[in-house]
Image (cartoon, rainbow, N blue to C red):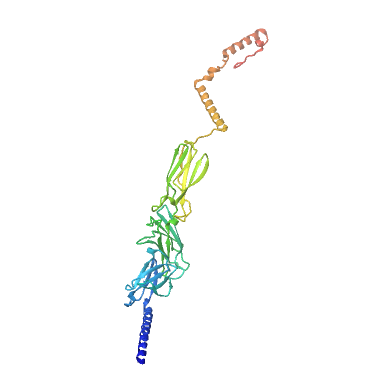
Amino acid sequence: MVYSSCLVFLLSVWFPLKTVCNAENTTEDENTVLLLKDFTVNISPGLVNVTWNCNITKSMKKYRYKVLLEKDSFEDLKVDKCFYVYEAFNFMDFTLHKGIRAQLLVYDLYINKVLNRGKEETYVPKGTNNTAANNFSCNIYHVDIMNCSWSVGKEAPEDTQYSLVFRRWSAYDKCQDYRYDSSGRQVGCVLKTPNIPFTEKVYVQVSGLSNQTSVQFFDEIYYPIHDVILDPPRNITLAYNSDKLEIKWQKPKTNGNLSDICFSYNINFTHKEETIIKNSTKNIYEIIKFHPNEKVTVSVRAKWINVCSHNSEWSAWSKPQTIGIDLVQFTPFHILIVLGICTAVFLIVLIFLCYRFRIWKKLFPQVPRPSHKLFDQIEQKEKSKNKTGGGRAAPADGLRFTKGGM
């Protein structure tokens, strides 16, 4: 009886222990095969290619596999496909040219708990170090002209040629007009009318090719709105309203429907040779205490508000608009000039009239001269007197006439 009791006790203890041990061994064995074999990550411009061994067991299909990229992006893997492609230009969560960190995770489908973690590793793009383009920058002018530039990698061979592509979902823009350095390498690009909205982020990739070595690529998540150089405000109008001068304008032309609150303005108006600059965040400005006919010249410029763009540069001034006429304030100097001009004109007119109608001769007639015959008669009389009187007689009244004058 004692033996049978002991046997029952041993059996009751042995079976639970065996079950527990088997369960532990099963879990341990399953954990060794849970991770995907030959898990690798390859990086190319705009893409992360994840591959693994396709020898998938039935037990592995019970779990969910994910790859963690840069500790931010959890991407589900379909183990039957044996590959997964992460399109950086669609998600635009991080760049790839400096490499990324990746880790394989295994989840339980029912409790959504991590059962196993692969080793976190850093994967870098293929290519010779320091051959990728760098110092990338762009400026956008007149809404539809994008001027971009970059520097050549320090170790890039002289035959390296770079190509620029802007990508956003399925749309992309390629460079239309490259600029070159002294070695003939492409170091800049001009895009005309790019299909790039200002307010959306864009994936930029600059790839390189060389016959001497493998060239690394450069990529960047780019916000065009931060590099837009604004045009001046449009359709500026001036109008007097009683003693107020009302100035209105429209916001600069932009790509996309941007709100008016994205802009601030400077109003430059010149009045009586005095230039004043005022600020405004609205599309209207009023200047008070102006005579309705006073001449005022106005121009306006614009810049981004910081919440919309990091570009703090002002646009060029708009073409000056003028209203009113010059109201000259006469001073004694002005009066003297006017009097002098009027006097000169009056004298010229008077002289012309006198000459034209001989008024001067009528007002001041010339005294007539004696006739030559009179002088001849007087001479003859003197000669005759001299002959008869034996001497020369003096002219009467002490006067002596000569021929040709008095």
Tell me the quarter of the picture where residue 215 sits. Answer: bottom left
Is residue 212 among what the camera can see?
no
Q: Nearer the viewer, residue 59 or 253?
A: 59
Q: Nearer the viewer, residue 274 or 263?
A: 263
Q: Quadrant of the N terminus?
A: bottom left
Q: Nearer the viewer, residue 172 or 71?
A: 71
Q: Does residue 7 appear left or right of residue 226 in this picture?
A: left
State the image coordinates of residue 264 (x, y, percent, origin top left): 46, 50
- Circle count: 0
Q: Residue furthest right?
A: 391
State the image coordinates of residue 388 (x, y, percent, origin top left): 65, 7
Q: Nearer the viewer, residue 118 or 24?
A: 24
Tell me the quarter of the picture where residue 394 sits. Answer: top right
Name above or below for residue 88 compared with residue 269: below
Name above or below for residue 196 compared with residue 298: below
State the image coordinates of residue 59 (x, y, percent, origin top left): 33, 77
Name above or below for residue 93 compared with residue 291: below
State the image coordinates of residue 291 (x, y, percent, origin top left): 49, 36
Q: Residue furthest top?
A: 388
Is residue 274 among what the camera can see?
yes
